[in-house]
Image (cartoon, rainbow, N blue to C red):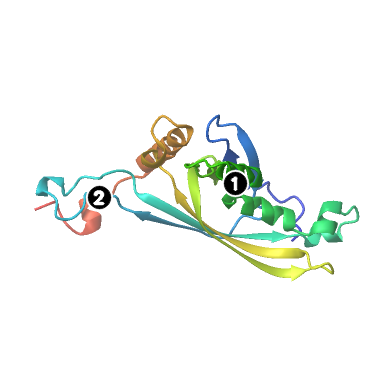
Amino acid sequence: MSSFPNSPYVIKGGIVLLDPTTAQVQKIIALQYNPDTLTRSLQVQAVSEGSDRSEALRLKGPPVETFKVEAEIDATDQLEAAGQNRTVVENGIHPQISALEMIVYPKSAQAISNFALSQTGTLEIMPVEAPLTLFVWSAKRILPVRLTEFSITEEAFDTKLNPIRAKVSLGMRALSFDDLGFTTKGGSLFLAYQQQKERLAALSQGSSFGTLGIGGIP
């Protein structure tokens, strides 16, 4: 998938993992090729039906926003290049796939530690805390998410059966300040994401009643 000479520089979408306590960056995972489509859906968080009529127009919080992207990973160019990357030659695209997969795995060291605690009779063992996952799609979209769907279709293999081309489908749910708390790093990032939406919405010019074919509200 070679690019044309003098083609414009294109920024990458990707995922950033932060330490949930210190907010220190643990890993940055850039998508090799930006997906052609980004599917989003918003589930409105309105006051439930059957409530008092005075509550009919009230919103409980920001909508639950979900994302879905289809990303491609391909080692073909690297395998054909004169100065081949030895990691790619020996492993194909296993490292890139594994970096994404590890987002939804608890660290093995923590799993071993928890098992050791259970063997000593510890009655309550806290579930392993995952990194704070950020979905980054340009400077206008940086928000905390939880991966909800993850599927991989491996499409080609080398002679060692290492995958060398694959499609990865990622489903994500935005985590708002209602989920993470207003004073947390994730909560502040979601608030900044919502405020960016408000600034962009303000740039949209409103229409007139005539556009709607009416003279006003009766």
Q: Is residue 114 left or right of residue 43?
A: right
The furthest residue to the right: 82
Q: Is residue 85 left or right of residue 22?
A: right
The furthest residue to the front: 121
In the rendered image, residue 127, in percent from the top left (x then y), is placed at: 50, 45
Badge 2 element: loop
| Residue 32 appears in the figure | no
Badge 1 element: helix
For disc 1, the marked residue is 115
Q: Is residue 21 left or right of residue 42?
A: right
Q: Of residues 153 and 211, which is closer to you in this image?
A: 153
Q: Is residue 30 left or right of residue 6?
A: left
In the rendered image, residue 178, in percent from the top left (x then y), is placed at: 36, 40
Counting residues from the N terminus, which is met first, the one under dot 2 or under dot 1? 2
Residue type beneath disc 2: Ala
State the residue at coordinates (74%, 70%). Answer: 156
In the rendered image, residue 206, in percent from the top left (x then y), is placed at: 30, 46
In the rendered image, residue 19, in percent from the top left (x then y), is placed at: 57, 35
Determine the CA span between mark 2 and mark 1. Answer: 42 Å
Callout in the foreground (2, 1): 1
State the residue at coordinates (68%, 56%). Answer: 97
State the residue at coordinates (79%, 62%). Answer: 76
For disc 2, the marked residue is 46
